[in-house]
Amino acid sequence: MEIKEIIVVEGKDDTIAIQRAVNADTIETNGSAISEETLQRIQLAQEKRGVIVFTDPDYPGRRIRAIIEERIPGVKHAFLSKEKCIAANGKSLGIEHASDEDIREALKNVYTPLEEKPTKEEITLADLMDARLIGHPSAKDRRIRLGEILNIGMTNGKQLRKRLMMFQITFEQFTQAVAEIDQEERNE
């Protein structure tokens, strides 16, 4: 599998894992204290070939993703769940621990956010509450599962609406994912 865009990762081990799974070039941020020079390289990469941000599913990874998203609009995003990024010893978390197959799957499900906000909001706050994704004891677990099903990553309640709009998730996709979560909970 060959990737045209340049993939932004956190470190050398992530680059090794990406290049083991696919044929791609990477830019390493070397942690969440992303430098101005690195941001400029990512901007140039976006202009020339496009960029896919593929950071770890943890706070530093989300922070890097947010910094890049704010500075360089139109970058694409690939996500992996925490479960797919846990080291064999269970002590660390990162893209470098994911299987080649999981990395390829995440890169197949890349999302490009909208450049401008949609005029009509398809999924409302009330829909999120009805789906028990906010304001409910099991909301966090349900949001994690929703992020896995829709391949949009893990979010808190506040970020969820923004992420759904940003990645143009339709009401139909949303309701199908919620139905899948409900079915899984009934089968437990």
Image (cartoon, rainbow, N blue to C red):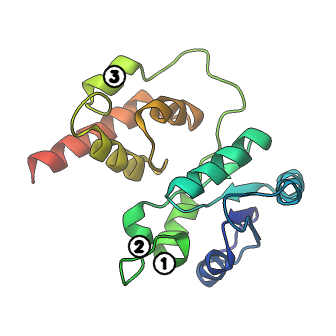
| Rendered residue at 41%/47% (across/down) | 147
Mark 1 residue crowding within 10 angstroms, few (<14) / some (14–19) / many (20+):
some
Query: According to the image, label 2 marks what residue?
Result: 86
Q: Secondary structure at mark 3?
A: helix
Residue 137 can be seen, yes or no: yes
The quarter holding residue 124 reads top left
Query: According to the image, label 1 marks what residue?
Result: 97
Nearer to me, 32 or 181: 32
Q: Is residue 2 left or right of residue 119?
A: right
Image disc number at residue 127: 3
Which of pointers 3 and 2 indicates the residue nearer the eye?
Answer: 2
Mark 2 residue crowding within 10 angstroms, few (<14) / some (14–19) / many (20+):
some
| Rendered residue at 67%/64% (across/down) | 31
For marks 3 and 2, give the CA distance. Answer: 32 Å
Residue 13 placement (x, y as % from top left): 62, 80
Q: Residue furthest top?
A: 119
Mark 3 residue crowding within 10 angstroms, few (<14) / some (14–19) / many (20+):
some
Residue 128 placement (x, y as % from top left): 34, 26
Please identify the quadrant where the C terminus is shown: bottom left
Residue 90 placement (x, y as % from top left): 36, 77
Q: Are marks 1 and 3 in contact (CB under 8 Å)?
A: no
